[in-house]
Amino acid sequence: MSSQSQHSDLDSSALGTHISSTPAAPMDPPSTSSTISESDENPCTSSSPSSAPPPVHLPLSWPPDATLSLQWIHHLTAAFDWSSKNLPPSQFPSVLPVSVFDTLILTASKILHKEPNCLRILEDSVASTDSTVVVVGDIHGQFHDLLFLLQDAGFPSENRFFVFNGDYVDRGAWGLETFLLLLAWKVFMPHRVFLLRGNHESKYCTSVYGFEKEVLTKYGDKGKHVYRKCLGCFEGLPLASIIAGCVYTAHGGLFRSVSVPSSKRSKGKKNRRISLNPEANGLSLGSLEELSKARRSVLDPPWEGLNLIPGDVLWSDPSMNPGLSPNRERGIGLLWGPDCTEEFLKKFGLKLIIRSHEGPDAREKRSGLAGMDQGYTIDHVVDSGKLITLFSAPDYPQFQATEERYKNKGAYIVLEPPNLDVPIIHSFEAITPRPKVNAYYDYEDVIDSDEELDLTTMATDP
């Protein structure tokens, strides 16, 4: 682990205590078990402006044998890193032609769409005894911080799994590079790299917070085609994961039960009735079986109708108030209290929930919950375990309208054998200075934390 980061081992006796704290320092060479030759560029280079020639041959091409390699991924990484510092965004096709994009996203989409709503990772007790799992929170297009994280944690390998909790795009200027690099890792190691969906992997959010404009800027007259392909890929992203039978991860978190009265089940969809009025019948936690049956292939998760579980999983937030209630601040999803965390953990034999979704801007408006200055918060500590919010975008958001920045750290979690239920949290600082680039959204006027959403513009299909 580089001295750019710090870590804390969270067990029952040391909640939230940092073992070490060191100032930022230059990045170390990649800490990975994979062998990289001297001719392979280190993908985690300095962010300083440069006029250096491209580190690899451009434009990139799809491997002739249609099989990705570690070398190809590092070439992709180095090319994206170089272009972010040396080329205007409109020249992105000279780095990754649309034909290569098409092949990559089609290959990845086929893999993702076949995966279940809730991934089961390391169910085999034998496999879990010598494997570690790295869990990553929101990235939001902060490509250079992602490169540091991958280096610091160690690249995916046979015994190092990665679970990403979503929100790869929007706000940051390199959402396309971030998403495509992670798709490449997914194609290369489909059973070691797992990509979950965040609320920003949606048509509504990407049209408001910059990703759509970013894609149109980078691919020009092919931009609409590329954007549509990205939206289609978003629809295939799984919603949640369970790691080693004891850790649940999702972008937003918990979800409601959506049950249909048995007397109505045989009469078809038109006659199906569902109760969504918490005052009348109360909200109750959903089951993993219900999660497995939810329809995730929607451009925007519905906030009304029958298919509410995807919206809950992507948009919900923890609260210090007991019970389940509608998330009125966001207009979609739920708020759940410590009692719900305990109920969910106990019912499904879990010890830990790792969710993301809230950065420093959102957390400063949440009374009773800790701030996101270290990249994580421990929100609930209950008899059966813990709930942690994990945020992996340091110095977020990239573009801010005020002089004073949050200067938050990002963090990632490592789960180690034999039990993988004790989170080791690594906090890290942003890679600065960032390459100069313009924002792809009106960050001075847009809302900061997904509040007061215009739900009527969502492309829902309840």
Image: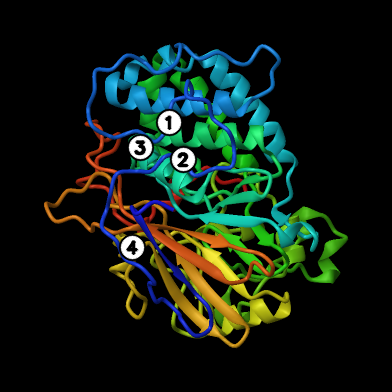
Residue extending furthest front? 38
Q: Earlier in the sequence, mark 1 or mark 3?
A: 1
Q: Earlier in the sequence, mark 4 or mark 2?
A: 2
Q: Amino acid at mark 4?
A: Ala
Q: Earlier in the sequence, mark 2 or mark 1?
A: 2
Q: Is residue 277 above or below residue 49?
A: below
**With 260 as the anchor, is 5 left or right in this view?**
left
Q: Residue at x 39, y 23 (%)?
A: 216
Residue position marked by numbered label 2 in the rendering: 30
Q: Is residue 184 above or below residue 91?
A: below
Helix, strand or loop at mark 2: loop
Q: Tell me, for residue 42, which label it has, or none.
A: 1
Disc 4 versus disc 1: nearer the observer: 1
Q: Amino acid at mark 3?
A: Gly
Closer to the camera in the image, 318 or 187: 187
Q: Residue at x 24, y 18 (%)?
A: 51
Residue position marked by numbered label 4 in the rendering: 362
Where is residue 450? Give x, y as percent. Answer: 37, 55
Estimate the spatial distance between the alpha carbons at disc 1 and disc 3, rounded to whole Å.
Answer: 29 Å
Estimate the spatial distance between the alpha carbons at disc 4 and disc 2, rounded to whole Å.
Answer: 33 Å
Q: Amino acid at mark 1?
A: Asn
Estimate the spatial distance between the alpha carbons at disc 2 and disc 1, rounded to whole Å.
Answer: 7 Å
Estimate the spatial distance between the alpha carbons at disc 2 and disc 3, rounded to whole Å.
Answer: 31 Å
Q: How many marks overall?
A: 4
Q: Earlier in the sequence, mark 2 or mark 3?
A: 2
Disc 4 versus disc 2: nearer the observer: 2
